Amino acid sequence: MTRPKHLYSLSRRSLLAGGAAMGALAVSGGWSRALAAPLLTVESLTLDVNGKAAKVFAVKGPTGEGIFAKEGNRLAGAVLNASRAPAVMHWHGQIFAPADQDRARPDGGELVPGGTDQVDFLLTPGTHWMHSHTLSEQQLLAAPLVTREADAGDAQDVVVMLHDFSFRSPEEILASLGGADAHGGHGAHGASQPTQGMAGMAMPGMDHAGHGMGAMGGMGGGMMGPAPVGADAGHMGHGMGGGMGAGMGGGMMAHANDVDYDAFLANRRTLADPEVVKVEKGGRVRLRIINGGTATAFFVSVPGLTPLCVAVDGSPCVPMEAEAFPLAQGQRIDLLVDIPASGGAFPVLAQVEASPRRTGLILATAGAPVARIAETADRPQGLLDLAFEGRLSAGRPLAQRKADKVFPIMLGEEAGYRWTINGRTYGEGRPFAVSPGERVEMAFMNPTTMSHPMHLHGHHFQVVGIGGRRFSGAVRDTVMVPPRMPVTIAFDAGPKGEWFLHCHHLYHMATGMMAVVKVA
C-alpha cells in the first residue's frame, strides 16, 4: 500500500540553501528551468485509511506532493495527467497578470488521461493550493501551492493539508444527498473552449468561462435590490422566499455536515497514525493550514502552545490570538507558534464543526515522547460563526474608495438539493458584468439552513461588512456566509476574463451554487 510522502517542513535556512531536491524545481527566477520530467504529475494511487484500501489521486511535484516555492518564482513547466481520469486543475488563490492568464493552461480545457500541458505564470505569495474543479476533488485531487513570502522570517514552515474522506465515490455521495450535477449540460459563455460541462471547469486565465448570474446595479433602497438580468419575478420569489420558508424562516435549524465521512485526514493520515514533524527546541514554526475538505469546516487549535494568526487565505493580517481558529472549506490560515526551549510534543488539531471528530498531526522535538491522541474530542464544537472574522484586520487593506458597482447576492436552498444564487443555478442567467479596475462590492445574504464558503476565482477581496457593521476586515479569496448573517466583500476587478464565484462546499457547487463575474 502506498504511503504518501510527507508534505513540506522547511526552515528558511534550508530553503535559501537550495538543496538538491529544491534545486530540481522547475521554476524560474534563479532556480533551474523546466526539466525533462514533468513539473507536476496527477497520479492515481492506493491509500490506506484505517486499514482499508482506497483509490485516490495525488498531485506530485519534484519533492513530493504539491509545490513549495519562494516569492518571485514562476511556475513554469509541464503538467502531466498520469491518472486514469480527466483532470481539471484550479490554481486556488493565484492572481494572474494579464500576460500570464492564458499561460496557466493555454487550451482552456480538461487534461485527458496521458495528456500534458505547459504552464508558466508568476506565483502569488502566500499559502495557497491547487485542486480539481470536478467531483474528483473529493478523492483527494488536491495539493499545496505555497509560495514563501520574502518577509516570512526565520520560522520553520509546516504545511498541514486537511481533507474529509469517504470510501464512497463522489457520485454516490451526491446521489445520497438527492442532488444532480447541475453543470453537465452547460458549456462556456463567451470563450473559445468547447462545451465541457462540469469536466471542463476552472482553468485559470479565463479560470473559467461559463453561464452565470444576471448582473445587478446598485443596492437601491434595500438589501434585495432589483431582480437579476434574465430572471423573472416568480423565479426570484421561489429562490428567495421559498428558500426562506424552507430554511430559517420556516423554523428549521441551521446545520452542518450533510455528508457522513469515514475519516478526516491531515496530510493524508488520521490521528490513529498521525504525521510527526520534527521541530527544534526554542524554534519558531509557521503552520500553513489548508482546508481541502469538500464539505467540512474545522476549528484549528494547538494545545500547549499559543498560536498567533498572521495570515488568512495567503494574505497577511494584523496578528491575532484565539483558542480555536475557524477554517471553512477552501480557506487557509497561517499560525506562528514558539516551541519551548524545554521541547516536547504538541498536537495541531482540526476538529469538525458541530462534531467531536477531529484529525491532526504532532510537532515534536528530538526525543520527546509522543502520546496517542483520540480521534474524538471530549465534546463537540459548535457551528462556525463570524466572531473571529469580525476581529480580523488586513495587513495590506484595499485603498479606501467608493464602490462603482454593488451586487446583492441571495444564496438559496430549494427542494431536490438544489442550491442557487439569486434564485438561479449555474447556467440559468448571465454573468455579473464589471470593468477592469472597478471597485466592486458584493453583499451576500443567506436565508438557507447551511453556511456557504463563497470563493471568487482570480481575485483577492476584503471583508468590509458583517451584519450592519462596516469595517476594514481581512483580505481573502474565500469567506464564510452563515445563515441569517449578511457579509459584504469588496474587490477591484482584475484583468479581462470570466471568473467563477461559487460555494466551496463541493456538492453545493455541483448542484448549482455558482455564477460568473465577467470582467470586460
Image: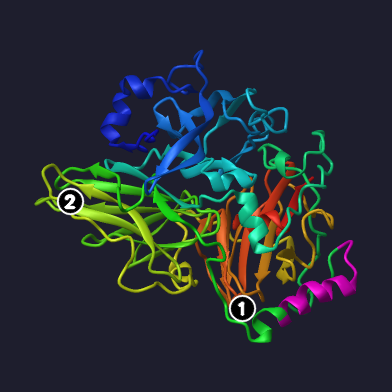
Quadrant assignment, res 154 = top left
Residue 185 in the image: state x and y as whole percent: 82, 47
Circles 1 and 2, Cβ within 8 Å, touching? The answer is no
Count of marks, rendered view: 2
Q: Is residue 453 left or right of residue 50?
A: right
Q: Relative to 154, is 443 above or below?
A: below
Disc 1 marks which residue?
484
Q: Residue 186, which numbered label?
A: none
Residue count near mark 2 (Cα–Cα under 10 Å), binned few <14, some 14–19, many ≥20: some
Residue 445 in the image: state x and y as whole percent: 67, 72
Helix, strand or loop: magenta stretch: helix
Q: Residue furthest top?
A: 36
Whether residue 456 is visible here, answered yes or no, is no
CA separation, marks 1 and 2? 43 Å
Quadrant into which the N terminus falls: top left
Residue count near mark 1 (Cα–Cα under 10 Å), binned few <14, some 14–19, many ≥20: some
Quadrant into which the C terminus falls: top right
Quadrant assignment, res 376 = bottom left
Q: In this picture, which residue range is highlighted in magenta?
A: 229-245
Residue 488 in the image: state x and y as whole percent: 62, 67
Of helix, strand and loop, which one carries label 1? loop
Residue in view at x 25 percent, y 45 percent? 276
